[in-house]
């Protein structure tokens, strides 16, 4: 399944393919994990919004044509944490 997320131009510029997304359908407390698989290169001149396509695994509780809230974790990263003993003092 897929969610079409309309995002402001400024947010769309910081987004990249593969970013994880948490999708919560309206009226539901259950969330689904998906990923951004495509970002539209076209911005609507009236609304200044573009579209990000989010792939969501199929679930029979999801309804095509329904509305949902998407929490996009753009800008997050996993980085190793070094112990203080690894830092040299001169």
Image (cartoon, grey):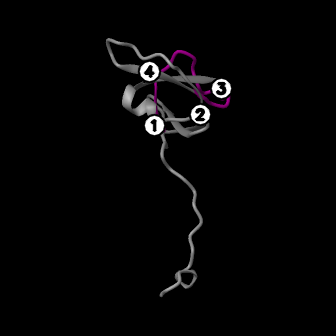
The rendered magenta stretch, by its main secondary structure, is classed as loop
Q: Relative to 83, does residue 20 appear above or below in the rendering? A: above
Query: Which of the 4 quarters of the picture holds residue 43?
Result: top left
In terms of sequence position, does the residue under pointer 3 or pointer 4 come before the other? 4
In terms of sequence position, does the residue under pointer 1 or pointer 3 come before the other? 1
Residue holding disc 3: 60
Q: Is residue 9 left or right of residue 38?
A: left
In terms of sequence position, does the residue under pointer 3 or pointer 2 come before the other? 2
In terms of sequence position, does the residue under pointer 2 or pointer 4 come before the other? 2
Q: Is residue 67 left or right of residue 18?
A: left
Q: Badge 3: few (under 14), some or many (20 or more) residues near its Cα, within 10 Å?
A: few
Residue found 52% across the figure and 20% down from its top: 40
**Are the residues tagged 4 and 1 within 8 Å (C-beta)?**
no
In terms of sequence position, does the residue under pointer 4 or pointer 1 come before the other? 1
Mark identifier at residue 14: 1
Residue holding disc 2: 17
Residue found 44% across the figure and 28% down from its top: 26
């Amino acid at each position: 399944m897929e969610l079409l997320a309309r995002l402001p131009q400024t947010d769309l510029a910081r987004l990249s393919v593969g970013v994880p997304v948490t999708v919560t359908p309206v009226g539901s407390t259950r969330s689904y994990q998906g990923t951004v698989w495509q970002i539209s290169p076209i911005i609507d001149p009236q609304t200044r919004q573009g579209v990000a396509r989010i792939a969501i695994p199929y679930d029979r509780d999801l309804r095509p044509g329904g509305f949902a809230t998407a929490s996009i974790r753009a800008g997050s990263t996993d980085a190793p944490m070094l112990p203080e003993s690894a830092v040299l003092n001169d």
